[in-house]
Image (tube, helix red, strand yellow):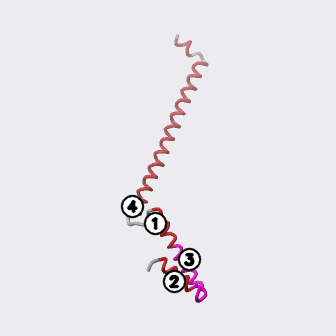
Amino acid sequence: MSVSTVLAQLMAQGQAEGTDLATLRAIAEEAGELGASRALMRLGLDDAGAAKDMAELRELLGAWRDAKRSAWKAAVGWVVRIGGAVVLAGLAARFGFWGWVK
């Protein structure tokens, strides 16, 4: 029996007999399961290989985050090095280093 059939039967039972708390909970549970199944189907994740696909995507996302973090660290490192070189060149010019070289 499919989820949509069970949901339809529960809805009919609720209409015919009046609803009690257990029926309402069952309707909500079946509706949630049906909605989740439809969402997974629309995303293409309703097959047996979906768990493997999600694990691969998580691994790829982790690698992307690591690469992005290391790229930022490298960029900041280069900016700091260039800034330090500019400061040293400014200090050398300020204190007359070019005069000492001659």
Local SS, label 3:
helix
Quadrant assignment, res 87: top right
Q: Which residue is mark 4?
A: 52
Q: CA distance from mark 3 to mark 4?
A: 29 Å
**Residue occupying the point 52% across, 80% down:** 8
Image position, residue 1 (x, y; %): 43, 80
**Residue occupying the point 39% across, 61% down:** 52
Asked if marks 1 and 3 touch (Cβ < 8 Å), the reply is no
Closest to the camera, between mark 2 and mark 3, is 2
Q: Which residue is mark 3?
A: 28
Image position, residue 47 (x, y; %): 40, 66
Quadrant assignment, res 89: top right
Q: CA distance from mark 1 to mark 3?
A: 20 Å
Q: Which residue is mark 1?
A: 41
Closest to the camera, between mark 2 and mark 4, is 2
Closest to the camera, between mark 3 and mark 4, is 3
Choose the circle earlier in sequence order: 3 or 4: 3
Residue nearest the viewer, comparing 66 with 60:
60
Kindly identify the amino acid type of the residue bearing the numbered disc 3: Ala
Q: Is residue 52 above or below residue 6?
A: above
Range covered by the magenta-colored residues: 14-32
Q: Which residue is mark 2?
A: 9
Choose the circle earlier in sequence order: 1 or 3: 3
Q: Is residue 94 magenta?
A: no
Q: CA distance from mark 4 to mark 1?
A: 16 Å
Closest to the camera, between mark 4 and mark 1, is 1
Kindly identify the amino acid type of the residue bearing the numbered disc 2: Gln
Residue nearest the viewer, comparing 22 with 65:
22
Kindly identify the amino acid type of the residue bearing the numbered disc 4: Lys
Kindly identify the amino acid type of the residue bearing the numbered disc 1: Met
Q: Is residue 28 magenta?
A: yes
Local SS, label 1:
helix
